[in-house]
Image (spheres, rainbow, N blue to C red):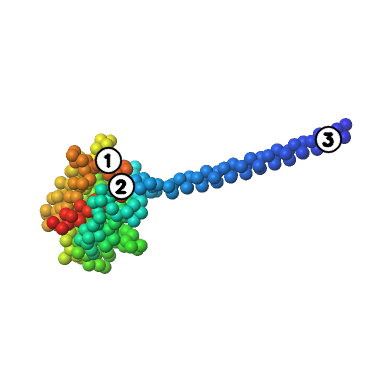
Amino acid sequence: MKKKNLVILVILILLLTVLSACGREAENKMQKSSIKDTADQIASTEEFGDESTIVMTESQETTGKNGENPVSSSETNEKVLPPAEESGMIHKDGAIENASELYQIFDNALFIGDSRTEGLSLYSGITNADFFCAKSLTIDRIVNGEAVKVGGNKISIYELLEGKEYTSVYISLGLNELGWVHIEDFVNAYKTLIGAVRESQPDAVVYVQSLIPVTEEKSAKGGIVTNEQIYWYNTHIVEIAEETGVNYLNADAPLINENGALLPDATTDGVHFKSDYCRIWAEKIAELSQQ
């Protein structure tokens, strides 16, 4: 009887040993499979064509003044496109062959803006200007002295304006402020910024840019970002330009359709511009700046 029990015990031990070995082998196979899947995923994100985009990490928009909500990341769906040097400085229709000559107007210029201006800095091919811009940036944060990366260093607009002499300053803000409850806050902050620019750069030509519309599809979804709201803000930007004596610049002509909405082919999310259209936008700004 004892001998029989001993045999059973030995069999059980052997069985447990085999099961344990099988479990470890299965776990190793799963780990190898997971590693391969991750590698494939990384590889797939590195492949994109001239017209495709890579989605950046979406950051949470900062709440505006008095509890207003600026354009949220879910509304604007920030995108990043291949840099201009990767996709070339010549449009498919050859429209920008003389871009370097056209861009001479931007010598010692400063662009102030949000994610659209960030796209301009990355994909337009403008290399002779400074850009004070960031995703989700709003005008109240600028006038309150928030630091933004310029040339690798974080600096406020006031420090930037005091540290260099500019020949021209282009301001493009308002997209992230479309949800503000009180338009007066936007107007007052805009005038404060213009005042700061003029105080530090008395000889600079100052341009305030109109807000370029979004696509009809994007606008039809309602919410904060609609072309009706953009038009309303533009009427106030016109008034700001008139009251402060700066130049109002509307460069949307090559970017919009017959209904005044952003061309569907110009964008991937209805709001931000593809790399080719960032360059078209830059061309139009340069053209209007010479008039």
The disc at residue 7 is: 3
Mark 1 Cα-neighbour bin, 10 Å: few <14, some 14–19, many ≥20: some
Label 3, label 2: how many angstroms apart (C-alpha)? 75 Å
Residue 146 percent coordinates (x, y): 30, 58
Label 3, label 1: how many angstroms apart (C-alpha)? 78 Å
Mark 2 Cα-neighbour bin, 10 Å: few <14, some 14–19, many ≥20: many
Sequence-wise, which precedes: disc 3 or disc 1? Answer: 3
Residue 85 percent coordinates (x, y): 34, 56
Query: Disc 3 or disc 1, which is closer to the eye?
Result: 1
Query: Residue at 24% across / 57% down in the picture?
Result: 99
Residue topped by disc 1: 264
Q: Say if mark 3 contacts mark 1, CB within 8 Å.
A: no
Amino acid type shown at disc 3: Val
Amino acid type shown at disc 2: Lys
Residue 88 percent coordinates (x, y): 32, 54
Mark 1: secondary structure: helix
Please identify the quadrant where the N terminus is shown. top right
Mark 2: secondary structure: loop
Amino acid type shown at disc 1: Pro
Mark 3: secondary structure: helix
Using the image as rendered, state which of residue 279 and residue 190 is in the foreground: 279
Sequence-wise, which precedes: disc 2 or disc 1? Answer: 1
Using the image as rendered, state which of residue 169 and residue 199 is in the foreground: 169
Q: Say if mark 2 contacts mark 1, CB within 8 Å.
A: no
The disc at residue 274 is: 2
Sequence-wise, which precedes: disc 3 or disc 2? Answer: 3
Using the image as rendered, state which of residue 284 and residue 199 is in the foreground: 284
Mark 3 Cα-neighbour bin, 10 Å: few <14, some 14–19, many ≥20: few
Please identify the quadrant where the C terminus is shown. bottom left
